[in-house]
Amino acid sequence: NYTAVSSAWPSASMPAHAVRIALAPHCSLSPSGAWSFFLGTCGVSFGIAGLLTLRGYWPVLAYAGLEMLLLGWALHASLQRRHRIEMIVVTEDSVEIETHERGAVKHTVFPRHWARVRLRDHVASLAPTQLVIEAAGKRREIGSFLTEQERQQLATRLAPLIGRLAESPPLPSGKPRG
């Protein structure tokens, strides 16, 4: 999921005429929902494993423990995605990409006149495409967590803002459309 906001977005460091697009993964599972799901699944799994252990099938208990450990790890990894945010700021002169993930910030700036947006086929044929902004030998993937359709929509949205190589189309005005 992504949100596009024009120059009305409040920011002290953003120029008056810029377009800011915020990208964040869609995480419908809340931490309390994850805990409820995990505890309920553990209860059912260990309950069945306990009954089977009493009947002499003791290896089932070890496998149930491994399954719940793997499920806990997967839920934790899924919940960590909530903290990732990618900001794309397109100004008259530059395209800036800032990624916030687990407290770390990665910042890349491209000259807008030489930047271009590309949907690249992934090396693995079954993997989704990669949406990249590239210029002067540098390349930065954006929206890796988006669905294929959302990635294509974002590429369609960014292409007229950034333009083709050696082209800087005018940015849309910050006035609301009505």
Image (cartoon, rainbow, N blue to C red):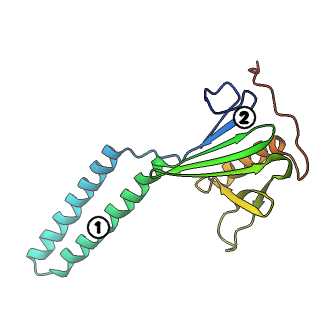
Instruction: Pick the residue in front: 6 or 153.
Output: 6
- Give the total number of marks visible in the rendering: 2
Amino acid type, mark 1: Leu
Q: Residue at x 77, y 44 (%)?
A: 94
**Residue most extreme to the top:** 178
**Residue most extreme to the front:** 13
**Gap in angstroms between the C-alphas marked 2 and 1:** 44 Å
Residue position marked by numbered label 1 in the rendering: 69
The location of residue 91, given as percent across then percent down, is 76, 37
Residue 155, numbered label: none
Residue 19, numbered label: 2
Circle 1 packing at 10 Å, graded few (<14), some (14-19), many (20+), is few
In which quadrant will I find the C terminus? top right
Instruction: Pick the residue in front: 75 or 131.
Output: 131
Instruction: Pick the residue in front: 76 or 138.
Output: 138
Q: Earlier in the sequence, mark 2 or mark 1?
A: 2
- Residue 139: image quadrant is bottom right
